[in-house]
Image (cartoon, rainbow, N blue to C red):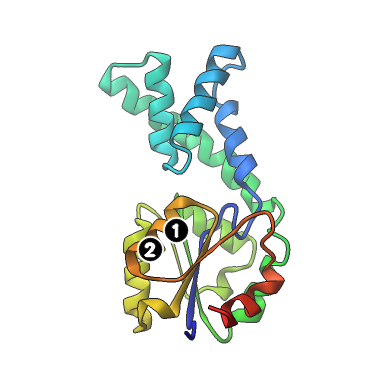
Amino acid sequence: MRIHAIVFDFDGTLIDSNQLKYDAYFELFPTDDRHARIIRAVISDIFEQIRYVILEEILRRLGVREKDSLKEKVKELAERYNEIVVAGTKTCPEKAGAEEALKKFAPAYGLYVSSTTPDAHLKEIIQFRKWDGYFRDVFGYPHEKPETLRRIIALEKLRSDQVLVIGDGESDRKSAMENGCPFLFVTEQFRFEDLGSVMDNL
């Protein structure tokens, strides 16, 4: 198998931002035990959902029922959450060796990002980090990962087995599986310096 394109998740894959994004939910609410317990439970139940869904479920479990109030409150909290996260993810550490790998592979492979981070914010973060030159395109919310992957396969005019998906979440694995693409799961043991040899062995 010969890989010609690589689709990266962003948070937890290229940058070490998962804890930052987790902690940001707690900054939006009072610091008492009830709020903390509900926030932890919701994130545990639907961790990979987009922030709007997570915030709506937190508010529902806190007792907000009226539809218009719920919608307005989610919008307000999501804006504050985005401010916290965008500021943090611009400067948080990259995953060890991530930029060096992007620099190495960009000339020979079509590199893409597919993330649940809102599209405009994702592009802002990548531009701030001066990584935009490495990628042929960047896709965030509301683009769905399976559809984004199909689009990339079509754009590159490749077979699905020539497009490698790299991510740390179940949504990344599922999008790869749905499209018949090889998938590389980012664990604590994953090292970007080994990426070349991993691809050679696919």
At x 66% / y 77%, what residue is drawn? 103
Tag of residue 173: 1
Identify residue for label 2. Answer: 177
User: Residue 134 falls in which quadrant of the image?
Assistant: bottom right
Q: Where is residue 111 in the image (x, y as percent from the top left)?
A: 51, 75
Residue type for callout 2: Met
At x 37% / y 73%, what residue is drawn? 152
The 10 Å Cα crowd at callout 2, few under 14, some 14 to 19, many 20 or more, is some
Badge 2 marks a residue whose secondary structure is helix
At x 34% / y 68%, what residue is drawn? 179
Up/down of 129 relative to 51, above or below: below
Up/down of 97 relative to 158, above or below: above
Residue type for callout 1: Arg
Q: Please indicate, yes or no, whether residue 84 appears anywhere in the rendered image.
A: yes
Q: Position of residue 17 (x, y in %)?
A: 63, 48
Q: Are discs 1 and 2 less than 8 Å apart at CB?
A: yes
Q: Please indicate, yes or no, whether residue 119 appears anywhere in the rendered image.
A: no
